[in-house]
């Protein structure tokens, strides 16, 4: 999950082998019948995933091995999807050849949920007495649509502030800023020393907490509607834009990179706003860097964050919904989550396992803290059109020194044109 989001970040600011077999629509008949392997009573399932690293695939395989030992009549085959995951999965879901259980990123989950290709889980959750209270409400909300649950989160991530202790010290700063107001004061000191204070992409996936902290909201989840032109959105966005013009924030592109990790690793910038995916990157490329991680900036006590998460979901076309549900509940259950926590590859989504995770990986505390006030990175069925509209308008606004009101008006006009 962590490295996957690092890849997403790089693509977003610049922006998962070949299918191993056929999907559930081509295997099996009824829920408890044989599934074409000649062994009466056994069931074959497929699990679809991207793989950000060999370690992630190995973790999933270890979890599946434990599941099969506990459920000897269920056999699971892994399908690793390369390239554009969603683009690959959509036609397979439409043609009923998708894997039985598969990854779904929160950013596009509403599009799949609203199209009717995912199996609602609520009856299975109730029947199997699955403890969903162990997940934070925000994580569960990311995979719910119109009162139904279509997935359970397998891991999670949020934003934090990574800071270079040596660069802060050069400007006479001994502790990292806690609020955006503190940041502006420290940024002035850093800039006076010729140090770039903060690097962030002009991307709603990063700056949206600023808008939320100032009381705004670009999206009405209850009505699946963009609310760009709401006057409450202007203060936070204007603050973000103004900090670019003051020279307190620069984009990674301004520093010659696709994402903020490399310039931070090279000591070009004092602070960056990234998720936990930056930690393994720094461990590989900046072993001598004297840095720390602190909570994402707040606005005078108001605290917002972005929540990035991925579910295990079930294709509605599966021939084996009971067994698929059993697999899903195992992979998002405490035993599998404990394996995730021990691996260090991702933050476990179950709160009961996060303590053990932090005991072994204390550097991730700020990211775990950020989950508590996180808003899922998703904008209903508006999806990528929404993101493209606001990002392009904000980029133009920063470059052309436009007001937040003009930026939001342009984003609204662009989205309306795209969705007509």
Image: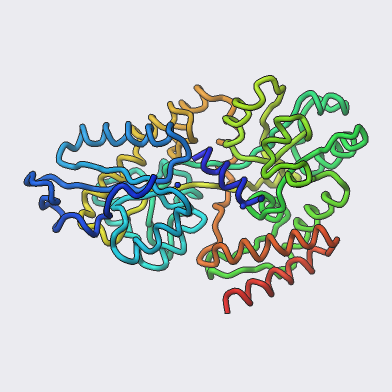
Position in image of residue 38 (x %, y %): 8, 46
Question: How many badges with numbers are in the image?
Answer: 0
Q: Is residue 45 left or right of residue 15?
A: left
Q: Is residue 20 left or right of residue 306?
A: left
Q: Nearer the viewer, residue 338 or 72?
A: 72
Q: Nearer the viewer, residue 103 or 189?
A: 103
The residue positioned 41% from the left and 57% from the top of the image is: 88
Position in image of residue 327 (x %, y %): 27, 44
Position in image of residue 266 (x %, y %): 74, 30
The residue positioned 70% from the left and 57% from the top of the image is: 215
**361 lies above or below 99:** above
Tell me, what colour scheme is on the image? rainbow
Q: Quadrant of the C terminus?
A: bottom right
* Residue farthest toward the right in the current orientation of the protein: 192
Q: Is residue 342 left or right of residue 2?
A: left
Q: Is residue 330 left or right of residue 11?
A: left
* Residue farthest toward the front in the current orientation of the protein: 18
Q: Nearer the viewer, residue 11 or 102?
A: 11
The residue positioned 89% from the left and 39% from the top of the image is: 188
* Residue farthest toward the top in the current orientation of the protein: 288
Residue 269: name its quadrant: top right
Position in image of residue 182 (x %, y %): 81, 39
**303 lies above or below 55:** below
The residue positioned 72% from the left and 33% from the top of the image is: 264
Q: Nearer the viewer, residue 64 or 224?
A: 64
**314 lies above or below 196:** below
């Amino acid at each position: 999950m962590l490295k996957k989001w690092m890849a997403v970040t790089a693509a977003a600011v610049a922006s998962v082998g070949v299918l191993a077999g056929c999907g559930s629509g081509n295997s099996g008949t009824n829920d408890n019948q044989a599934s074409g392997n000649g062994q009466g009573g056994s069931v074959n399932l497929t699990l679809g995933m991207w793989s950000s690293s060999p370690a992630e695939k190995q973790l999933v395989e270890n979890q599946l091995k434990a599941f099969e030992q506990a459920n000897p009549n269920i056999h699971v085959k892994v399908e690793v999807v390369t390239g554009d995951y969603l683009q690959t999965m959509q036609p397979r879901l439409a043609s009923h050849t998708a894997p039985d259980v598969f990854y779904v990123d929160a950013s596009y989950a509403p599009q799949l949920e609203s199209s009717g290709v995912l199996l609602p889980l609520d009856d299975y959750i109730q029947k199997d007495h699955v403890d969903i209270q162990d997940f934070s409400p925000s994580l569960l909300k990311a995979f719910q649509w119109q009162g139904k649950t279509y997935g359970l989160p397998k891991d999670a991530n949020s934003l934090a502030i990574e800071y270079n202790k040596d660069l802060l010290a050069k400007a006479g700063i001994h502790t990292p800023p806690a609020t955006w107001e503190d940041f502006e004061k420290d940024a002035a000191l850093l800039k006076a020393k010729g140090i770039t204070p903060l690097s962030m992409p002009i991307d709603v996936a990063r700056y949206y907490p600023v808008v939320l902290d100032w009381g705004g909201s670009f999206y009405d989840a209850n009505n699946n509607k963009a609310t760009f032109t709401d006057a409450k959105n202007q203060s936070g966005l204007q603050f973000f834009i103004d900090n670019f013009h003051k020279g307190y924030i620069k984009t990674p592109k301004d520093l010659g990179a696709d994402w903020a990790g490399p310039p931070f690793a090279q000591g070009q910038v004092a602070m960056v706003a990234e998720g936990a995916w930056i930690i393994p990157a720094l461990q590989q490329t900046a072993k001598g860097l004297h840095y720390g991680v602190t909570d994402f900036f707040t606005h005078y006590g108001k605290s917002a964050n972005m929540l990035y998460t991925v579910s295990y979901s079930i294709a509605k076309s599966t021939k084996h919904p009971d067994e698929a549900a059993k697999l899903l509940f195992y992979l998002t259950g405490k035993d599998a989550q404990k394996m995730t926590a021990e691996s260090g590859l991702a933050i476990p989504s179950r709160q009961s396992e996060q303590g053990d995770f932090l005991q072994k990986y204390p550097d991730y505390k700020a990211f775990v803290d950020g989950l508590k006030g996180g808003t899922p990175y998703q904008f209903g069925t508006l999806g990528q059109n929404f993101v493209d509209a606001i990002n392009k308008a904000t980029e133009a606004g920063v470059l052309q020194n436009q007001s937040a009101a003009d930026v939001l008006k342009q984003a609204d006009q662009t989205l309306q044109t795209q969705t007509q």
